[in-house]
Image: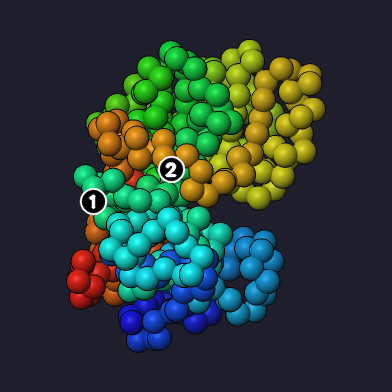
Amino acid sequence: MKAIVLKQYGGIENLKLEEIEKPVQKDNEVLVKVISASINDWDWALLTGKPFVIRMLYGAFFKPKIKILGVDIAGKVVATGKAVTAFKPDDEVYGDLSECGFGGFAQYVCAEAKALTIKPSNMTFDQAAAIPHAAALTTQGLIDEGKIEKGQQVLINGAGGGVGTFGIQIAKLYQAKVTGVDSLDKQAMMKSMGYDETINYQSEDFTKNGKQYDLILDTKTNRSPFQYLKSLKSGGKYVTVGGHMSRLIQIVFLGPLIKLITGKQLKLLSLKPNKNSDYINELYSAGKIRPVIDGPYPLEKMPQALDYFGQGKHKGKIIISVGDEDNTLI
Ligand SMILES: NC(=O)c1ccc[n+]([C@@H]2O[C@H](COP(=O)([O-])OP(=O)(O)OC[C@H]3O[C@@H](n4cnc5c(N)ncnc54)[C@H](OP(=O)(O)O)[C@@H]3O)[C@@H](O)[C@H]2O)c1
């Protein structure tokens, strides 16, 4: 099979399209013919080996252990391991493989059955590949941790990326008034998606404009926790899904103390991959959410697409077309 193989930490010159052996599923795994995959922050971190903690997480300081990147996939079941009862050949599935070895940028991947969900028949493979990681971060950030309520004032920082483009759709289900913060390039797209107000972070600091919110969802934490407090109403919540490591550590350690003193909550979300996928399928089937897709780009252009992601130029989710339903390369 064809796959994009990571040779060394660094830049995209270390990603090579190669012919390698097709994997064989273990008893608890499903062999999936990948049709679409999407790019995530994990892929960028595993390519660059930064932040350094990513090397510790995967026990690979000098040479990457994860050879084939790709967290989010959508495709067709080819075969199932002996212990798998939930899937059968030809089922159309999608999922987040971050807890079972990655491997999405390849024609075939073995995924633990628990990482997969049946794809609604009206959802395209490209749409399905855009959903798992970003929609899970969004629903867990806004609903599970943020406990969003009807009519609240919500701010999403990083509003034009994967989480932000799902975030506006989820927040609007609660009739929230939503402010989106992102770069100048993304302002028009954010307005067209329904953000009530948009802020260009390159020219305005939302923590210094005097406005306050009931709930803030952040994908790019880069300030001290005390700065975010100024933007929260009394009893407000700030939930971050990612950002600078030192700032995230401050949120974890100072958050409980700050809550005790001010009543405002600052939390770091720990993603539970593939949780809420039934709810996300329901929302999709009811026409309430649609992924924003950048691409699709063919498998051989995945390194360039990952570079484009690293530069932050993408809007929504970057999709890689790995194969068609007969698995010829597109
Ligand atoms: N908590 C967990 O367990 C967990 C698990 C997996 C991933 N994550 C994290 O979740 C996040 C995923 O977010 P995503 O998929 O939405 O990422 P994304 O698609 O890269 O979107 C991030 C957006 O933020 C914008 N941005 C960059 N710098 C900014 C700044 N200083 N202020 C405001 N916006 C800024 C980017 O646009 P420009 O570049 O044009 O500015 C981009 O549109 C990542 O931080 C990832 O590390 C967390």
In primary-sequence order, the first of circles 2 and 1 is: 1
Residue 111 coordinates in the image, percent (x, y): 46, 65
Q: What residue type is labelled 1?
A: Thr
Question: How many numbered callouts?
Answer: 2
The quarter holding residue 237 reads: top right
Image position of 254 with respect to 135: above or below: above
Q: Do the residues labelled 2 and 1 touch (CB within 8 Å)?
A: no
Q: How far apart are marks 2 and 1 (CA)?
A: 16 Å
Residue 3 coordinates in the image, percent (x, y): 37, 78
Taking depth in this image into account, of 302 and 191 the one nearest to the observer is: 302
Q: Which amino acid does label 2 sit on?
A: Ser
User: Does residue 62 show up?
Assistant: yes
Q: Mark 2 points at which residue?
A: 277
Taking depth in this image into account, of 42 and 101 the one nearest to the observer is: 101
Residue 265 coordinates in the image, percent (x, y): 67, 25
Image position of 230 with respect to 83: above or below: above
Q: Mark 1 points at which residue?
A: 124
Image position of 32 with respect to 273: above or below: below
Q: Residues within 10 Å of mark 2 (few under 14, many from 20)?
A: many
User: Does residue 185 show up?
Assistant: no
Name the residue: 50% across, 55% down.
114
Relative horizontal placement of residue 284, taking residue 96 as reference (left or right): left
Q: Residues within 10 Å of mark 1 (few under 14, many from 20)?
A: few
Rendered-image quadrant of the C terminus: bottom left
Relative horizontal placement of residue 287, taking residue 163 as reference (left or right): left
Residue 87 coordinates in the image, percent (x, y): 39, 59
Label 1: element kind? loop
Name the residue: 46% across, 31% down.
156
Label 2: element kind? helix
Name the residue: 26% across, 55% down.
125
Relative horizontal placement of residue 125, taking residue 98 as reference (left or right): left
